[in-house]
Amino acid sequence: MSSPSSPSLHSAPAPSTDQPQIVVSGIQPSGTLHLGNYFGAIRQHIELHKAFESYFFIVNYHALTTLNDAEALKKYSIDVALDYLALGFDPKQSHIFLQSDVPQVTELSWIFYTITPVSQLEKGVSFKDKVAQGLSANAGLFNYPILQAADILVYGGSRVPVGADQKQNIEICRDLAIRFNERFSPENPIFPVPEPYILEDVAVVPGVDGRKMSKSYNNTIGIFDEGKALKKKVMSIVTDSTPMEDPKDPESCNVYSLIKLFATAEKREEVAAAYRAGGYGYGHAKNELLALITAHFAEARERRHELSKDVGYVMDVLREGGKKGREQAESYMSRVREATGLITTY
Ligand code: ADP
């Protein structure tokens, strides 16, 4: 897969080397993975999993906060795994699995509920935003950051590659790690305090309507969209009504924001100059974007097509990943039970 414009991973703080770094991150199977997921998170996951022990989980419990359709949830869950494998995730190097295959996550969530002030969750930007966009204000959505914190800490995650929308949730997770350690294991802290890993130049990818691209907002361009469906979405990107012949500001245009993610520096300059010169319409820019998307994912699309013929293999990868996930989670949970006084008799 070509990625001429890959922003340097060095633009985010480099992982410290004085302790083993464990990279963790989750992705919701609540819809088709999109360009925001890819540039904001997945591309970094693919880079990092080769260098650091990594746990990537398909957060199907989180998806239930917005998706109540069993068949769709099953399909999207497998699709996420297929997408990762097609995009270059190597299961020999790190682990990918289903969140619900690691029951320790929900166990730890409950313990975290008991040390989280409701007032902190009430300030949740993501919760308020989703409710404002018309999603149901269910308790799962409200408590979403707690489950996310359990997801990160149950594997001893120290580095969390995410998009900028997750900043506040990672803060809540850091607070929980500190609070838990202070309260239950002050002498020998159980949890590392994780660092977010956010690349500023791809922090928030806009959707076709100009809002943050999100599965919850029905404004996405799928990583593996192709043909007419892809064209329709690209052509639907909202622009202003500046006439074709007039000069335009590339930096305030949603189409250009997306072009920037794919194009080489040279191409970016060329397109920006065409915007500023006038005589270059949004239709031209959209065609440019369409060509860039198609070329960028061409190899991965081919691989995905092949992989989709062998769902058994995908299930094997998830099963193996889940086994590793449970082992790692149990090593933390046995210490957590001991520290909190939860007796187990089995
Ligand atoms: P969604 O909002 O589409 O359901 P998820 O919650 O599954 O996305 O997020 C998965 C990862 O993708 C997270 O790290 C999130 O920060 C990142 N991400 C999601 N949307 C965007 C976006 N528009 N721009 C940048 N990163 C994003």
Image (tube, rainbow, N blue to C red):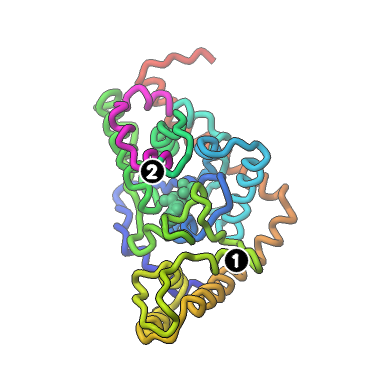
Q: Main secondary structure of the magenta part?
A: helix
Residue identifier under label 2: 129
What residue lies at 50% left-to-right and 37% top-to-bottom?
Answer: 62
Whether residue 183 is visible here, answered yes or no, is: yes
Q: Which mark is residue 280?
A: none
Quadrant housing residue 210: bottom left
Q: Are marks 2 and 1 in contact (CB under 8 Å)?
A: no
Q: Nearer the viewer, residue 43 or 325?
A: 43
Image-based side of 196 in relation to 313, left or right:
left
Whether residue 156 is visible here, answered yes or no, is: no
Question: How far from the left and from the top, in percent, is residue 34?
Answer: 53, 57
Q: Nearer the viewer, residue 188 or 129?
A: 129
Q: Is residue 59 above or below residue 9?
A: above
The three-letter code of the residue at mark 2 reads Asp
Span of residues in magenta? 109-131
SS class, disc 1: helix
Name the image quarter holding the N terminus: bottom right
The three-letter code of the residue at mark 1 reads Lys
Q: Residues within 10 Å of mark 2 (few under 14, many from 20)?
A: few
Work out whether mark 2 precedes mark 1 in sequence or the reverse, and give the earlier one.
Answer: 2
> Does 162 lie within the magenta span?
no
Q: Is residue 114 above or below residue 14?
A: above
Question: How far from the left and from the top, in percent, is residue 137?
Answer: 44, 33
> Does 129 lie within the magenta span?
yes
Q: Nearer the viewer, residue 36 or 45?
A: 36
Residue identifier under label 1: 232
SS class, disc 2: helix
Task: Report whether the residue tagged 2 is closer than 8 Å to ligand 1.
Answer: no
Question: How far from the left and from the top, in percent, is residue 96?
Answer: 55, 47
What residue lies at 48% left-to-right and 39% top-to-bottom?
Answer: 135
